Amino acid sequence: MSVEPKAVTKASAMRGKIVKSFRDIRGELKKVIWPTRKQLINNTITVLVGCLLIGIFIWVGDLIFSKISSLVFTR
């Protein structure tokens, strides 16, 4: 009498894939070099200042083009 291997169901195969994915994610997160508090604050300030400068640039450009278009199309 021979013992047959247990058939792998779709649900157990999917569960195994999900568990493997979470193990891989945990392994990758251990490799991440997390920023210090000082680095995080400096990077946040840099991004906010950059966004502010780009916003001002777009606002000035819009203001200039709206003045030009109002001069051209009102006559």
Image: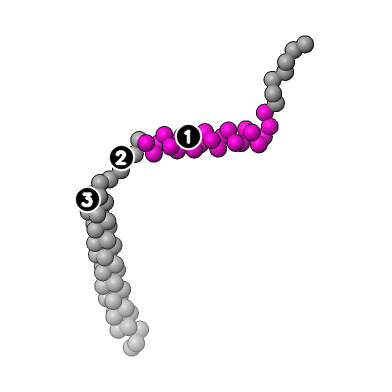
- The residue type indicated by label 1 comes to Arg
The disc, 1 or 2, on the residue closer to the chain's N-terminal end is: 1
Quarter of image, res 19: top right
Label 1 sits on a secondary structure element that is helix
Residue 55 can be seen, yes or no:
yes
- The residue type indicated by label 3 comes to Lys
Residue 50 can be seen, yes or no:
no
The disc, 3 or 1, on the residue closer to the chain's N-terminal end is: 1
Residue at (67, 34) in percent of width and height: 10
> Which residue in the structure is indicated by mark 3?
38
Task: Name the foreground residue: 59 vs 41.
Answer: 41
Eyeballing the image, is 17 above or below 7?
below
- The residue type indicated by label 2 comes to Ile
Residue at (34, 87) in percent of width and height: 74
Percent x, y for residue 7? 70, 26
Eyeballing the image, is 69 above or below 2?
below
Circle 3 packing at 10 Å, graded few (<14), some (14-19), many (20+), is few
* Magenta region: 8-30
Residue at (64, 33) in percent of width and height: 12
- Locate the C terminus by quadrant: bottom left
Circle 2 packing at 10 Å, graded few (<14), some (14-19), many (20+), is few
* Res. 33 mark: 2
